[in-house]
């Protein structure tokens, strides 16, 4: 299993641990993360959730081999797939979620941060949403949330061109709270998560719900709209070219597409 979970001192930790593949997320790993979030939600001993990765890598995003061989279906099949279960669990959890971004956060590695409550990034982190260069479209409501946070022209830089964020830019863009030295980011995030042990859990839950209330319906609707397009794009010749190029360690050639 490439997702490690543990609950200690009121904090349920979800650790992405597949360093040999740069923490790329498989269908089974999404399911494990969805289950861990649902378990944290149900466990009265859990006051906060911590999501973290490995030194130097948070996650390289969806496993590209899975994209090719096991793309989520469309319509209701898509809605039931583990990745959508994970998205709904993260959007729906009413306990605080803290992220420690230990290194590169690509694709869903960045978009999942948009749904965490507190985000700390390593000074070695690099965030990127290269959906277009993979022949895909944005997911996890990033097409809604990123323009709201950054404005349209900066959002185009990040989502159309796929330009990466430095850790400092992630803070400026209000995706992250602070940049920490690589060796300290996990402990810092854990200490922040543990602060919820001293706070009244009911007031924390209700406040989180209020903070997210205005946006949640739009976020869920956008996830569904993006999901339909994303599933279709996964089967597109443009995406096939991008995925094959990744595994053949070459630049993709989109010159033949119109
Ligand atoms: N899916 C499947 N395998 C992946 C992967 C992914 N998202 N990211 C990395 N890997 C695999 C590589 O294929 C390689 O496997 P191999 O050792 O069997 O050849 C291994 O992990 C190491 O990756 P590598 O690219 O050699 O590491 P790097 O340090 O040079 O680069 C990244 C790290 C994260 C910058 C780079 O791997 C990358 O860009 N990954 C793809 C990111 C992406 O496009 N994700 C999808 C977003 S929607």
Image (tube, helix red, strand yellow):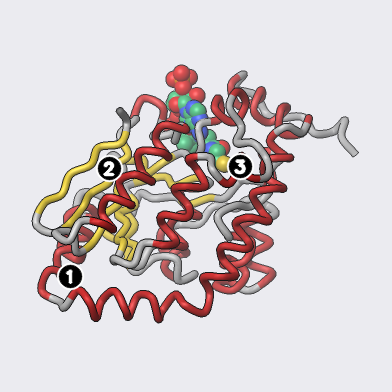
Horizontal relation, residue 39 to residue 114: left or right: left
| Mark drawn on residue 250 | none
The reply to whether the C-beta atoms of the residues labelled 3 and 2 are less than 8 Å apart is no
Q: Quadrant where the C terminus lies?
A: top right
The reply to whether the C-beta atoms of the residues labelled 1 and 2 are less than 8 Å apart is no
Q: Residue at x 30, y 34 (%)?
A: 17
Horizontal relation, residue 43 to residue 106: left or right: left
Disc 1 versus disc 3: nearer the observer: 3
* Mark 1 vs 2, N-terminal side: 2
Q: Tell me the element at label 1.
A: helix
Disc 3 versus disc 2: nearer the observer: 3
Residue 104: x percent and y percent?
Answer: 42, 45
On whether ligand 1 comes within 8 Å of the CB at mark 3, the answer is no
Callout 2: 10 Å neighbours few (<14), some, many (20+)? many
Q: CA distance from mark 1 to mark 3?
A: 35 Å
Residue 169: x percent and y percent?
Answer: 47, 64
Callout 1: 10 Å neighbours few (<14), some, many (20+)? some
Q: Tell me the element at label 2.
A: strand
Q: Quadrant of residue 225?
A: bottom right
Spot the residue most to the top. 248
Q: CA distance from mark 1 to mark 2?
A: 19 Å
Q: Quadrant of residue 245?
A: top right
Q: Residue at x 76, y 33 (%)?
A: 236
* Mark 3 vs 2, N-terminal side: 2
User: Which residue is labeled 1 in the image?
Assistant: 196
Horizontal relation, residue 146 to residue 113: left or right: right
Spot the residue most to the right. 258
* Mark 1 vs 3, N-terminal side: 3
Q: Tell me the element at label 3.
A: helix
User: Which residue is labeled 2 in the image?
Assistant: 15
| Mark drawn on residue 78 | 3
Residue 162: x percent and y percent?
Answer: 63, 51
């Amino acid at each position: 299993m490439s997702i490690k979970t543990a609950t200690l001192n009121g904090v349920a930790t979800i650790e992405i641990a597949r360093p040999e593949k740069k923490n790329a997320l498989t269908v089974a790993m999404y399911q494990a993360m969805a289950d861990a979030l649902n378990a944290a939600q149900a466990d009265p001993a859990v006051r906060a959730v911590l999501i973290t990765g490995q030194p130097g890598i948070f996650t390289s995003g969806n496993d590209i081999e899975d994209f090719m061989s096991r793309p989520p279906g469309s319509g209701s099949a898509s809605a039931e797939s583990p990745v959508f279960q994970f998205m709904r669990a993260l959007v729906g959890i009413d306990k605080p979620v803290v992220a420690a971004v230990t290194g590169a956060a690509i694709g869903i590695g960045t978009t999942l941060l948009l749904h965490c409550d507190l985000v700390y990034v390593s000074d070695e982190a690099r965030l990127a949403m290269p959906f277009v260069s993979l022949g895909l479209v944005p997911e996890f409501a990033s097409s809604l949330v990123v323009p709201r946070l950054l404005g349209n022209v900066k959002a185009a830089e990040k989502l159309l061109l796929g330009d990466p964020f430095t850790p400092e830019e992630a803070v400026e863009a209000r995706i992250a709270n602070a940049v920490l030295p690589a060796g300290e980011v996990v402990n810092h995030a854990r200490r922040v998560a543990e602060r919820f042990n001293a706070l009244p859990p009911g007031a924390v839950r209700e406040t989180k719900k209020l903070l997210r209330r205005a946006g949640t319906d739009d976020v869920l609707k956008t996830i569904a709209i993006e999901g339909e397009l994303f599933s279709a794009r996964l089967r597109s010749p443009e995406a096939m070219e991008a995925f094959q190029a990744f595994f053949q360690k070459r630049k993709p050639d989109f010159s033949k597409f119109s």
